Each structure stands twice: as structure tokens, then as C-alpha cells.
């Protein structure tokens, strides 16, 4: 059994992204390369940040270097975790290792990986659990909200497999040939102004992630799945980038009926108002006015910018 200690660090967002994963400036994320100086055999407990990889009970996954044909190409002597360091993956495999981390606020993890399997039959699945491993869901399951403009609590992914990428047993997963190194990311996203309810089963502070490899009953003599350079981040969303500009006295804020009032301005006809979602989608872009109707938009945090090309005012609006 190996426990690999990971301390999750904070990062402050300096912008909003139109990509699926809602991040910005990555601050000081922990880069976990699996090399010797990552203290593979050391376990520490730090309150609220007990982070580790657990390979308990796994027979398939190994940590080390490899000379397997596809895995070793461009890998050098890098230490990685993979479906065996020397042998092709076996038939009827269904084995995994678990990454546990405490997300607190919009946790993101990313990883570099390569895979070489039989397309549509064998491959790697990323699953997550919010109940300490009692139940598991696919990263592309019912909680996945990739591509949605209004997301409050969801799983978000980038450079992942698609819902049509199924394995022999119907699971969605990475399959075929990765075409070399690939970087994939996943986020357990919770909108900072969304209310948590007892029925919210998509997010949690304490999250397990597992990398699961499955294969059918036909031997294919292929390398399998190799994973390296796991990066963990914790993003706490803020309006930091707006602090460079003076804010206007918009009211009410928070907005309860969808109507927000902007102050009268001299030469207002020279100004323009734009309002964007936290995902960076432009929702309103019109000449300056003192009344803006947001009734058709869901509750959440929005950003406004008022500019005439020279002077700029910016801030955030909370819609309840």
C-alpha cells in the first residue's frame, strides 16, 4: 500500500474562463510528478488537507519507469503510475487507484496521460465519489454540465472522453490511442452564491477520484494507461480583476426582482454597458442606460463593465 501526500494550495481567480472548467490564475497549485522527492512512502495529516493517492489492493497499477513501446516514447526515465511497468494489460481487468482530496472551493485536478488500448473495448474511466467511496459516478455522468452557460453545482471536464466514447461494458472512458501525451482536467464546481440543499448530490468538499481501467476477454498486447504530473488546485472565486477599475453605485445589489439601476452619468451617450456571466458569456451589451433588466437570467454572480473607450467602471452584480 502506498500513500502519497498532497497538500492542496489556494489560488485566487484573476478572470473568468469560457472553457468548461471555471478557473483563472492558477496561483500556486501543487504539481505532483510521482518522482522520488514526492515522498511516495510518507503519509502526513494536515487538518482539512489530508491529500493522498491510495493504491491499496490494486494488482494492476504500478509506480515506476517503463520500457513498454508506446509508454516509453517521449517519456524518458520519468516515474509515472501505469497499468504495469513491463507487461501489457491483462484480460478482464477492472482495477483502480484512488485520489482523495479536500476541495473546499471549486477544486480542480488535472493530469498528463497516455493510453494505448483497443478502441471501443478497453480503456480508462475517471469516476468520483462524494460519500467517501461508497458510491461512484462517471465524470461524464448525470452531474456533468460541460458547455452549459449557467452552472451552479456540477462536474466540469476539459479534454476528456465524450459521452459517445463507450467501452465494451457500456462505461464511458478514454479508449484507443491518445496520440501521445494528453492533458485532461476535471472540476467539482460549486457556484459561490448558489444555495446548498439536501438534494444537491453533485458536489461535496471531501471528494474521492478514482482512475479505473477495464478490459474485455480478448488479449490485445497493448500498453494500457499511464498517468503522470497530477496537479491539484483550489479556486476561490472573486472579483479581483475588477479592482483596477472604479465601481459604480448600482442598486439594489443584491438584486431581488431582476431590475438593476445604474446611476446617471454625464455624457452617458458616449458609454456602453456590458454584462457577463461568471463563465465569461456576454449577456448584455448595449448603450448606457440607467435601468437593466436581468429577469430572464438565473440567480448568481454577474460582472458589469461600463466604458467609453477611455474611462472604465466595473464591478459585480448579485442576482438572487
Image (tube, helix red, strand yellow):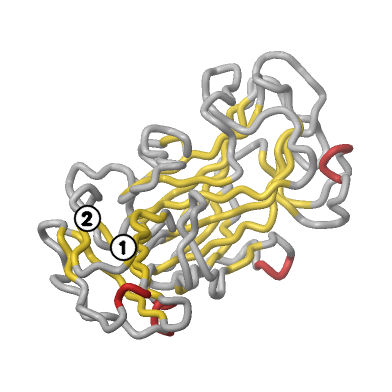
Residue 294, label in figure = 2
Q: Residue at x 66, y 24 (%)?
A: 122
Viewport quadrant of the C terminus: bottom left
Contact (CB < 8 A) between labels 2 and 1? Answer: yes
Relative to 18, 283 lies left or right: left
Residue 239 in the image: state x and y as whole percent: 37, 74
The residue sitting at 21% across, 73% down in the picture is: 262
| Residue in view at x 86 percent, y 56 percent | 77
Q: What residue is disc 1 on?
A: 302
Q: Position of residue 4 (x, y in %)?
A: 58, 60
All told, the count of numbered labels is 2
Residue 10 seen from this side: no
Q: In the orientation shown, which residue stands out farthest toward the left?
A: 257
Q: Nearer the viewer, residue 102 or 114?
A: 114
Q: Secondary structure at mark 1?
A: strand
Q: Position of residue 65 (x, y in %)?
A: 81, 51
Residue 148 placement: quadrant: top left
Viewer can see residue 29: yes
Amino acid at each position: 500500500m502506498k500513500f502519497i501526500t498532497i497538500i492542496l494550495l489556494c489560488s485566487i481567480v484573476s478572470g473568468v474562463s469560457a472553457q468548461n472548467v471555471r478557473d483563472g490564475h492558477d496561483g500556486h497549485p501543487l504539481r505532483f510528478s510521482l518522482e522520488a522527492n514526492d515522498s511516495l512512502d510518507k503519509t502526513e495529516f494536515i487538518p482539512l488537507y489530508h491529500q493522498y493517492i491510495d493504491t491499496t489492493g490494486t494488482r494492476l497499477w504500478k509506480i515506476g519507469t517503463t520500457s513498454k513501446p508506446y509508454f516509453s516514447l517521449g517519456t524518458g526515465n520519468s516515474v509515472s503510475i501505469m497499468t504495469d511497468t513491463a507487461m501489457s494489460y491483462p484480460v478482464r481487468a477492472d482495477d483502480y487507484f484512488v485520489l482523495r482530496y479536500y476541495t473546499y472551493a471549486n477544486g480542480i485536478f488535472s493530469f498528463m496521460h497516455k493510453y494505448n488500448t483497443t478502441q471501443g473495448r478497453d480503456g480508462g474511466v475517471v469516476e468520483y465519489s462524494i460519500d467517501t467511496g461508497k458510491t461512484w459516478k462517471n465524470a461524464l455522468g448525470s452531474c456533468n454540465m460541460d458547455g452549459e452557460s449557467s452552472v451552479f453545482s456540477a462536474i466540469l471536464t476539459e479534454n476528456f472522453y465524450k459521452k459517445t466514447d463507450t467501452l465494451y461494458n457500456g462505461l464511458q472512458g478514454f479508449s484507443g490511442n491518445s496520440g501521445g501525451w494528453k492533458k485532461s482536467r476535471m472540476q467539482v464546481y460549486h457556484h459561490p452564491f448558489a444555495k446548498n440543499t439536501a438534494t444537491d448530490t453533485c458536489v461535496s468538499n471531501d471528494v474521492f477520484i478514482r482512475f479505473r481501467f477495464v478490459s474485455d476477454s480478448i488479449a490485445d498486447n497493448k500498453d494500457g494507461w499511464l498517468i503522470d504530473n497530477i496537479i491539484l488546485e483550489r479556486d476561490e472565486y472573486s472579483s479581483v480583476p475588477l479592482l483596477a477599475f472604479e465601481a459604480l453605485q448600482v442598486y439594489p445589489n443584491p438584486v431581488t426582482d431582476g431590475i438593476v439601476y445604474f446611476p446617471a452619468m454625464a455624457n452617458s451617450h458616449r458609454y456602453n454597458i456590458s454584462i457577463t456571466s461568471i463563465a465569461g458569456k456576454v449577456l448584455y451589451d448595449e448603450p448606457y442606460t440607467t435601468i437593466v433588466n436581468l429577469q430572464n437570467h438565473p440567480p448568481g454572480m454577474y460582472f458589469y463593465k461600463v466604458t467609453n473607450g477611455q474611462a472604465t467602471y466595473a464591478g459585480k452584480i448579485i442576482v438572487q
